[in-house]
Amino acid sequence: MNKINKIAIFGFARSGKSALKLAMKQGLQTFIVSRGEVKSWYSETEGIVPMEQCFSEDEARDLFAQVDQIILSPGIPREHEVLQLAREKNIPIISEIEFAYQYFSHIPVIAITGTNGKTTTTTMIKEALEAFGKKVFCGGNIGTPYCDIVFIKESLDFAVIELSSFQLESIVNFHPQVALILNVFPNHSERYDDVRSYALAKNNIFKNMTESDVLILGKENDYLDTIKAKAQTLLFSLYELDDFQREFDTSKAYLRGEHNLANFLATKMTLNALGLKDKVLFQNFLENFKGVEHRLEFVKEYQHLKIYNDAKSTNALATTTAIKAFDEAIYLVLGGKLRNETDKIIGELLPFKDKIKKIFLIGEVTDRLADELGEEFEVEKGYDLSTTLKSVKDQKLAGHLVFSPGYPSFDQFKSFVHRGESFKKLVEEIFSN
């Protein structure tokens, strides 16, 4: 790697702020580029860099062509027009993931990607390793930037990193010892022209792996033919769990659904790859793992209604996965921000027509979904969570209410976390008596 002295951070959200602090620790001259006038966001830099080293997008074209490296926010495409001159001059454009790895490659990495289940599996692997007595940093797309590892003072055994396709687009030397691609299903049509392009972005996770590494692949991936890895490759499937269930008593697990058993299996395969094979310890972990916030999380039981928060669901597959986790019929809360005009969900929901008693609609897509689903399902337009939950209470519903929106959160919320926290707060307020 050439000597890096001067960098630009493009995009100043969570990962950009973390990258800035790591850059300061490394003594790098750092410039920040973000949307809007500098004075509107400069306070977020906490005065770490002078204002003259901060630029709006419109001012940054020449700057990007003069630095040694550009650290790109995952939400910004590499093809952004303001990066054109930098691309022409072959200025390295990397993700915050790659930036952190440059300085912490000595800590073995376990990396996880996939369309669905990656946050749950990432958390499972982290907690399972801790159950086996290992010191672990857990970060990446899960919410804590990888660059935050700079603040860990204790010696670490592993870094467990969740990765989105956006983050994987801009890695160079990032090299996990164990990598998992859990599944690949249609997603992020706003970024990729087709699903194959999306799958190829995820395949960057193993680009630097060697024969001594282990790649774990879920069979729920129509693009396995694109995977040509040097690493030892192991396969698992959502539909091949018999051996795992014979080895472990999964009836004692808190988590519902076959998809979560598959996540446990992927976690066990990861531990095996690391030489951690204590069956008693893993059974104990399986029985005590409570799940992940906003992923089919049990929130409250009110009279005869059990309420679940699956705010992480941003696509149809995540929602149908949640539906499949219940043997009983459910009430579904659905909706959010429209991705594009061709985005339909009725085809995925129709197989569950007899299982879904009613669909409550929220968000930007409310009217659109009412038109799409109204002939096949009983639907109710609430537009927002507060109105919807008050209506649910007034109707004195019994059974299971599942908030699994199936669409992005950015119409009414800052993120899926904000969406899930808002849902839980409203549940507590509305169903308090």
Image (cartoon, rainbow, N blue to C red):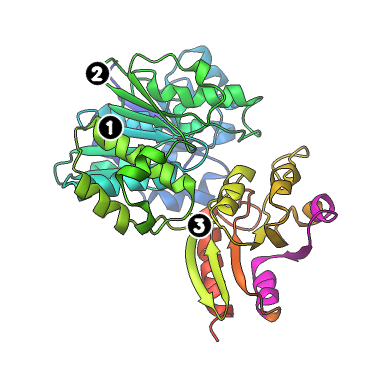
Which image quarter holds the N terminus? top left
Give the quadrant of residue 398: bottom right
Q: Name the residue located 47 percent from the left edge and 61 percent from the top edge.
A: 297
In the image, which disc is placed on residue 296?
Answer: 3
User: What range of the chain is rendered magenta?
Assistant: 370-393
In the image, which disc is placed on residue 212?
Answer: 2
| 307 left or right, relative to 96 | right
Q: Amino acid at mark 2?
A: Ser
22 and 147: which one is in front?
147
The relative height of residue 249 versus residue 100 in the rendered view (above or below) is below
Q: Earlier in the sequence, mark 2 or mark 1?
A: 1
Q: Nearer the viewer, mark 3 or mark 1?
A: 3
Disc 2 is placed on an element classified as: loop
Which residue, given by chain and number where applicable, does mark 1 sit on? 109
| 277 left or right, relative to 231 | left
Q: Name the residue located 44 percent from the left edge and 17 percent from the top edge.
A: 91
The reply to whether residue 44 is in sight is yes
Q: Name the residue located 50 percent from the left edge and 73 percent from the top edge.
A: 300
Q: Amino acid at mark 3?
A: Leu
